Amino acid sequence: MNFTLDQLRAFLEISHAGGVRKAAERLNITQPAVTARLKALEDTLGTELFDRSAGMMLTNAATRSSATRSNTWNSAA
């Protein structure tokens, strides 16, 4: 399972900003670029990370994945 730092940044920024438009502004890239990075990450992980019908709310899979990644990053520091 390989994903890029750009894909992870897009995911984190969408989750913090609450949407693709704000994430794109914060990352200083276009909305389609953010969407493409998110889609590539979801394809790599084999699951949707946001419930788009609920305004980009994290899915259960994303919440679990985010917690796991956070613990991994913290223990590596």
Image (spheres, rainbow, N blue to C red):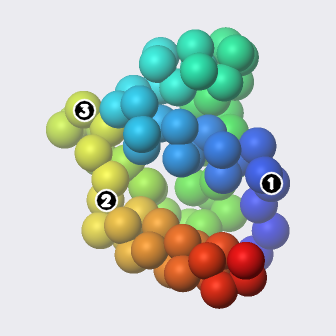
State whether residue 69 appears in this view.
yes
Residue type for callout 1: Thr
Sort mark 3 into few (<14), some (14-19) or many (20+) by Cα contacts within 10 Å: few
Residue type for callout 2: Thr
State whether residue 31 appears in this view.
no
Q: Quadrant of residue 54?
A: top left
The residue indicated by pointer 1 is 4
Is label 3 in a helix, a strand or a loop? Answer: loop
Q: Quadrant of residue 37?
A: top right
The residue indicated by pointer 3 is 55
Q: Which image quadrant: the C terminus?
A: bottom right
Which x, y percent locates residue 15? 42, 43
Name above or below for residue 9 compared with residue 73: above
Name above or below for residue 76 compared with residue 16: below
- Cα–Cα gap, marks 2 and 3: 11 Å
Identify the residue at image location x=53%, y=26%.
23
Identify the residue at image location x=61%, y=77%.
74
Q: Which image quadrant: the N terminus?
A: bottom right
The one nearer the camera, 72 or 14, is: 72
Of the two numbered discs 1 and 3 on the same chain, state the one appearing first in sequence: 1
Residue type for callout 3: Gly
- Cα–Cα gap, marks 1 and 3: 25 Å
Is label 1 in a helix, a strand or a loop? Answer: loop
The residue indicated by pointer 2 is 59
Name above or below for residue 57 compared with residue 55: below
